[in-house]
Image (cartoon, rainbow, N blue to C red):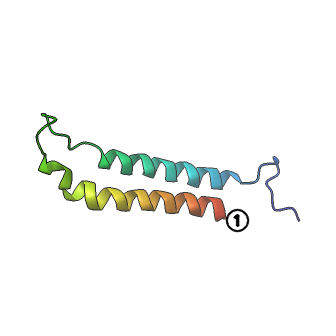
Amino acid sequence: MNSTSPEGFALQRTNYIWMAIGIAILIIGYALMSGGAAEDPTAFSEEIFNARRITVAPIVVLIGYGTIFYAILKR
């Protein structure tokens, strides 16, 4: 039996759904990383070191990449 989908695509519909979910998680993770800039470009802002930017956002991004990896390898 052929392992490709009936439409001739290498992946099935569920794979693309999982991939879209992974991309959405990536967008959320990168949005969590954004911000923290100082009003004055010569001043230093401690806001870039909060837990959301250095802990939560990278974990969310890794979960997004893991979801995409799962979507590609899922049969």
User: For the point 13% across and 37% down, which residue is it?
Assistant: 42
Q: Is residue 67 left or right of residue 3?
A: left
Q: Residue furthest top?
A: 40
Looking at the rendered structure, the secondary structure element under dot 1 is: loop
Q: Residues within 10 Å of mark 1 (few under 14, many from 20)?
A: few
* Quadrant holding the C terminus: bottom right
User: For the point 34% across and 44% down, which residue is it?
Assistant: 31
Q: Quadrant of residue 12?
A: bottom right
Q: Which residue is mark 1?
A: 75
Q: Is residue 16 left or right of residue 2?
A: left
Where in the figure is residue 1, as x and y percent of width and height?
89, 65
Q: Is residue 73 left or right of residue 48?
A: right
**Looking at this view, is 59 or 48 the one in front?**
48
Where in the figure is residue 21, as x and y percent of width and height?
51, 51
Where in the figure is residue 71, as x and y percent of width and height?
60, 59
Rendered view: 34 above or below 41? below
Where in the figure is residue 37, as x and y percent of width and height?
20, 40
**Looking at this view, is 56 or 16 the one in front?**
56
Q: Residue furthest front?
A: 42
Q: Quadrant of residue 60?
A: bottom left
Rendered view: 17 above or below 35? below
The count of marks equals 1
User: For the point 13% across and 46% down, which residue is it?
Assistant: 45
Tell me the kind of residue under disc 1. Answer: Arg
User: For the point 24% across and 55% down, which residue is it?
Assistant: 52
